Image: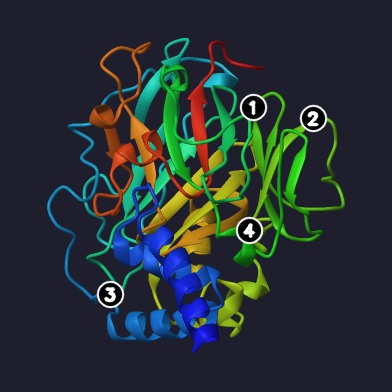
Amino acid sequence: MLVLAVLLSSFGWSFGNALTAANQQSVPLKAVEWIRGHGGAQFLRVAEDVWYTWHQPPKGGLPPKGAILDTKTHVSGVSGTGANSQVPKNVKPFVSPALPGEGVWQPEGRTTNGVHGLYVTTMRPDPVHTSLVAGLAWMNPKLLSFTLFAGGQEPGGGGWPNMGPINSTQAKSLVAAFNSGFRMHGAMGGYYSNGRTAYPLVKGQASFVIYSNGTANVVKWGGSQALTPNVVSVRQNLSLILDNGKITPGVYSPNYAQWGATVGNSVLVWRSGVGVTSTGAIIYAAGPGLSVATLAKILQRAGAVRAMEMDINTTWVNYFYFNPPTNNGPATPANGSKLVYDMMRPPQRYFEGTARDFIGVFARKTAIG
């Protein structure tokens, strides 16, 4: 009985602290994360699989009004001239006939030298689930810079040079922010930033790499990409879903654990991914009801030649962009927008304490050549 009392006391202290932790997570989510971190990951995989199997996205229908970005009401950008002002080609929709605005890039966010570095669009992800909407963001690294922010729990430890939440100084140049990958114990990869290794980098794994000049890339770690002096941050997550412009065979693997708790990729959930084009632009994609294959196809159609899955499930998949009243004004939750209308978390997520790491996107003072 004494041993049992000690065990119950230890459980109560640990579980109670988790439920009362000062962060944005709901109490049920805090409970789930505690279970996941205390040996219950396999149980949660089964539970999530059952839930999503019985709650499949609807087939057919149309998105609600306003879900597809309206080209008539969104801001008009300055196209500019030269390589730094490249504008992406519109994305061919998967559904025919297309809805107005589907796959049409819209400039958003503050500018550099009067030129937009961010373009966003929305489109239906496949011809079957025609009421769903996925979002895409195209980011020009010559006009934008990228920063990996540590969260309160991921990757763990304190003292990171860039750690959430976004502060008032950073907000003055913030253009967008989006989720990183899985929790590190499930990412099957490493985490390196500013000369510090939280988890060892794994050869062959998909990696979002940020360099000292603020540019970024999506690569398979090892070979041509190593930990050279110009590498500032590396966030690994699983393996590539696109390589050399082609969908990798592992995307169709029946090993559901490889992609985050879905059996044979037949269970459709919120997913996000990030890729790089042949010209070096970074593309983010996210939406509900996506398999890994669907996510890869969206990124491929948007022009990515290499891509990786980032995170899954409604709580963690989010991308916010900001349109302050003046170009030099601070980004705030009030001038933030969700990339996809039904993303769960609000734009203030990264302005408050967050348990997970994330990527911040900032306007450069001057474009790089």
Q: Circle 4 sits in a helix, a strand or a loop, which is it? A: loop
Question: Viewer-proximal residue, 120 or 278?
Answer: 120
Which numbered tag is attached to residue 57?
A: 3
Rendered image: mark on residue 237? 4
Name the front one of labels 3 and 4: 4
Does the CB distance between marks 1 and 3 fall below 8 Å? no
For residue 214, the mark is 1
The kind of residue tagged 3 is: Pro
**Is the C-beta separation of discs 1 and 2 under 8 Å?**
no
- Looking at the image, is 280 positioned above or below residue 355? above
Secondary structure under tag 1 reads loop
Amino acid type indicated by mark 4: Asn
Q: Residue 367 sits in which quadrant?
A: top right
Mark 4 or mark 1: which comes first in sequence?
1
- State the CA–CA distance, disc 4 to disc 1: 20 Å
Q: Is residue 248 above or below residue 50?
A: above
> Relative to residue 255, is residue 126 drawn left or right?
left
x and y percent of residue 46 in the render? Answer: 45, 86
Q: Is residue 106 visible?
A: no
Identify the secondary structure beneath mark 2: loop
What residue is shown at x 20% (from left), y 51% (from top)?
Answer: 67
Q: What residue is rendered at 60% in x and 54% in y?
A: 307
| Disc 2 from disc 3: Cα separation | 44 Å
Of label 2 and label 3, which has the lower sequence position?
3
